[in-house]
């Protein structure tokens, strides 16, 4: 499993946190999602053989959030 932290600058409220959590936990291969509203970051583990970063970013994009970088 790979661990990653993404910067999501569009996140501004608890609704955003819930939407992002739902988008990521709905993907097979994504585990242990931790979202920090104050730092606007999303940390999680994922199985690269089950889900690609492109698919993860697309799920966030579909939920209305842009990934501005990996930390």
Image: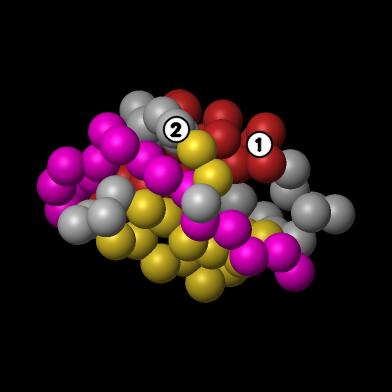
> Cα distance, mark 2 to mark 1?
15 Å
- Displayed quadrant of residue 45: bottom right
Instruction: Judge by depth and name the residue closer to the eye, 20 or 67.
Output: 67
- Residue at disc 2, secondary structure: loop
- Name which residue lies at 29% across and 49% down: 40
| Residue 42 in view in this figure | yes
Q: Which residues are magenta?
A: 1-16
Is residue 3 found left or right of 68 in the rendered image?
A: right
Pointers 2 and 1 in contact (C-beta within 8 Å): no
Residue 54 percent across, percent down from the top left: 67, 33
Residue pushed farthest front? 71
* First reached walking from the N terminus: tag 2 or tag 1: 1
User: Callout 1 environment at 10 Å: few (<14), some (14 to 19), or many (20+)?
Assistant: few
- Residue on which disc 2 sits: 68
Q: What numbered label is drawn on residue 47?
A: none
At mark 1, the secondary structure is helix
Q: Residue at x 25, y 41 (%)?
A: 11
Can you tell which quarter of the image residue 31 is in?
A: bottom right
When the figure is inspected, residue 6 is found, relative to residue 67, above or below; the finding is below
Q: Quadrant of the N terminus?
A: bottom right
The percent position of residue 65, horizontal first and vertical second, equals 37, 32
Q: What numbered label is drawn on residue 55? A: 1
Q: Could you tell me which residue is drawn at 67 percent across and 41 percent down?
A: 53
Q: Is residue 17 left or right of residue 47?
A: left
Q: Residue furthest left?
A: 13
In front: label 2 or label 1: 2
């Amino acid at each position: 499993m790979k661990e990653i932290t993404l910067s999501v600058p569009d996140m501004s409220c608890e609704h955003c946190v819930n939407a992002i959590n739902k988008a990521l936990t709905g993907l097979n291969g994504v585990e242990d999602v931790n979202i920090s509203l104050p730092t606007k970051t999303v940390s999680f583990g994922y199985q690269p053989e089950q889900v690609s970063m492109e698919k993860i970013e697309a799920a966030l994009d579909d939920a209305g959030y842009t990934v501005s970088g990996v930390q």
